[in-house]
Structure formats: C-alpha cells, structure tokens
Image (cartoon, helix red, strand yellow):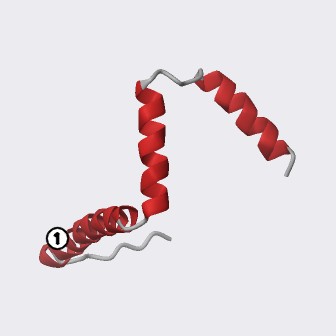
Amino acid sequence: MATSVQIPTNLFRKFLQAGEAFDKFSDAYEDFLIAHNPKLLRELRKARREHLAGKTRPFEEFERELKRSLKRR
C-alpha cells in the first residue's frame, strides 16, 4: 500500500536551501579546523612537496598494502 505526502513547494525549497547552507558551513568549518592545526598543516605541506618532487607510487601498490593492513585487523 503506497502512500504519498504532498509537500508545499516553498517548504521544499527552504529544505534544499538549508541543506546547501549546511554544506557551505561544513566546508568552511573544515577549512577553519585545518588552518588552526599546525601539525596537520606541516604534514599537508610535506606531502605536497613530496608529490611535486615525484615521490609517488602506483595506486595498485597502495591498494594492495591497504588490503593487507585491513586483513590484519
């Protein structure tokens, strides 16, 4: 037995706007937390330098290592 509920268009639009506002807030809050975490900033900068220097590995290698480490748990 299917039942449907009608939602006023304006209410639905407000719901969508609230979701978009939450996404924007979430992104801004994440940026704030990263910017105020010196250790994380150092690690991100180091990772970026290594990436630019070509210190990378194939994804398949990473994937195999990840699967092995998950099996050990």
Residue at x 16% of width, y 70% of height: 13
Residue at the limit of the structure toward the right, as seen here: 72
Residue at mark 1: 13
Residue 66 position (above or below residue 6):
above
In the picture, measured across the screen, residue 56 lies left or right of residue 29, that is: right
Could you say which quadrant of the image residue 33 lies in? bottom left
**Residue 20 image offset from top left, x and y in percent:** 23, 65
Could you say which quadrant of the image residue 3 lies in? bottom left
Give 13 or 45, whichever is nearer the viewer.
45
Name the secondary structure under disc 1. helix
**Residue 54 image offset from top left, x and y in percent:** 47, 21
For the image, the number of numbered tags is 1
- Label 1 is placed on what type of residue? Arg
Give 4 or 16, whichever is nearer the viewer.
16
Residue 33 position (above or below residue 73):
below
**Residue 14 image offset from top left, x and y in percent:** 17, 75
In the picture, measured across the screen, residue 52 lies left or right of residue 65, that is: left
Give 22 or 60, whichever is nearer the viewer.
60
**Residue 23 image offset from top left, x and y in percent:** 29, 65
Residue at x 44% of width, y 23% of height: 53
